[in-house]
Amino acid sequence: MATKPETQVNPSFILQEKGVVKYEDRPEPELKSDNDVIVEIKVTGICGSDVHYLVAGGIGDFIVKSPMVLGHESAGIVHKVGSAVTTLKPGDKVALEPGVPCRKCVRCKEGRYNLCPEMAFAATPPFDGTLAKYYALPEDYCYLLPGEMSLDEGALVEPLSVAVHIVRTANVKPGQSVIVFGAGPVGLLCGAVARAFGATKVVAVDIVQDKLDFATKYGATGAFLPSRTPAPETAKRLIEENALGSGADVAIDASGAEPSIQTAVHALRVGGVYVQAGMGKPEVTFPITSLCVKEIQLRGSFRYAEGDYRLSIELIRTGKVDVKPLVTGRVGFWEAEKAFEEVKAGKGIKYLIDGVNP
């Protein structure tokens, strides 16, 4: 546990290099634009990407080359606002959307700003994250939380928005059947969002029974523990045991595991939709013949885009998705490394880290 220095201005939890973290005092961020807001961070959730940067020092082309503040699933209290800010004031509770695009490119202009090549995303090299006392963002990337919503729920708007984007990408409709591979936080939230969108069957698939048990308590209508058999055989059993008829309407992979990807394609009905959301090996063996002859629609999903945050807040506000049961542990800011160790060990579902002044 780190010693809490009382005189620090902006204590920050830093990934110094692969496998090495430390606390460091940094200057309070500035209002670089009249439209910017400075938020005092009150709670931050740990994402798998944070842990991956700590353990591996990078994800794909994003390599940690210099010290970087970790964290991007945050909520807090508005501390300062720029002179042109009209929708927020000091003291407001906000959820932070932690990626700011260029706003000028074609992808930004069509609302798909998550694909902006100039995206500055928190805790993605070389940009610092939110595990600090203060963090600055443009006004329109800070979402005012309804009075009844807690800051914990505000922090979980980020992973919920990932799930909302995935389910919207799949175009899930009322009455459909959905298989979700991977019962981690994003997979669980995909199932919850699919149910909120009207799916009548949501089957969770995972190799850990405890995760499946939680998934069925959380809203999945069925659960499936795969065995070490070829993907077509596993898919056949998955369909039969969950009464999916000729196959599911939608399959979502939130695991990135090659066997899950293969099984998903075989478990879909003809004309079904497959969405890849989990990241695993850069290249996998893929059942391309089945994809073609069944005319499956293959789509990728990355982060979130226009409307996803607002819809996520509304799903929480109306009680259609309850994110609170996902929280299985929390630590103080000066114990952040302990929470990372718990997540690395595969314990629990979602760990929260309190702000410097919770």
Image (tube, rainbow, N blue to C red):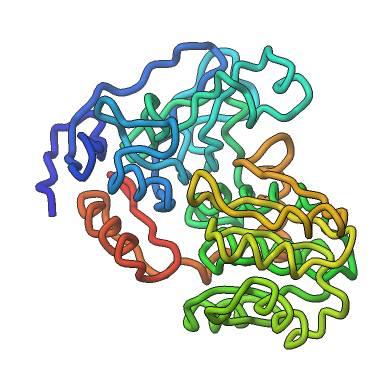
User: Residue 176 occupies which quadrant of the picture?
Assistant: bottom right
Residue at x 65%, y 78% (from the top left corner): 234
Q: In this view, does 81 lie above or below 141?
A: above
Task: In this rendered view, identify the residue nearer to me: 156 or 20.
Answer: 20
Where residue 92 appears, as percent x and y from the top left, is 53, 39
Place of residue 341 in the rendered image (x, y in percent of width and height, measured from the top left): 25, 60
Q: How many numbered discs, if any?
A: 0
Rendered residue at 75%/19% (across/down): 109
In the displayed structure, does residue 229 sit left or right of residue 136?
right
Q: Position of residue 75 (x, y in %)?
A: 48, 45
239 to the left or right of 327: right
Q: Which of 265 and 129 is in front in this view?
A: 265
Q: Which residue lies furthest to the front in this view?
A: 289
Q: Quadrant of residue 248?
A: bottom right
Q: Is residue 112 above or below residue 209?
A: above
Give the camera-side residue of 116 and 316: 116
**Residue name at image x 48 percent, y 37 percent:** 91
Residue 240 rendering spot, x and y as whole percentages: 77, 86
Residue at 68% x, 44% y: name it: 300
**Identity of the residue furthest to the bottom in this view:** 241
Above or below residue 245? Residue 96 is: above
**Which of the image's four quarters has the N terminus?**
bottom left
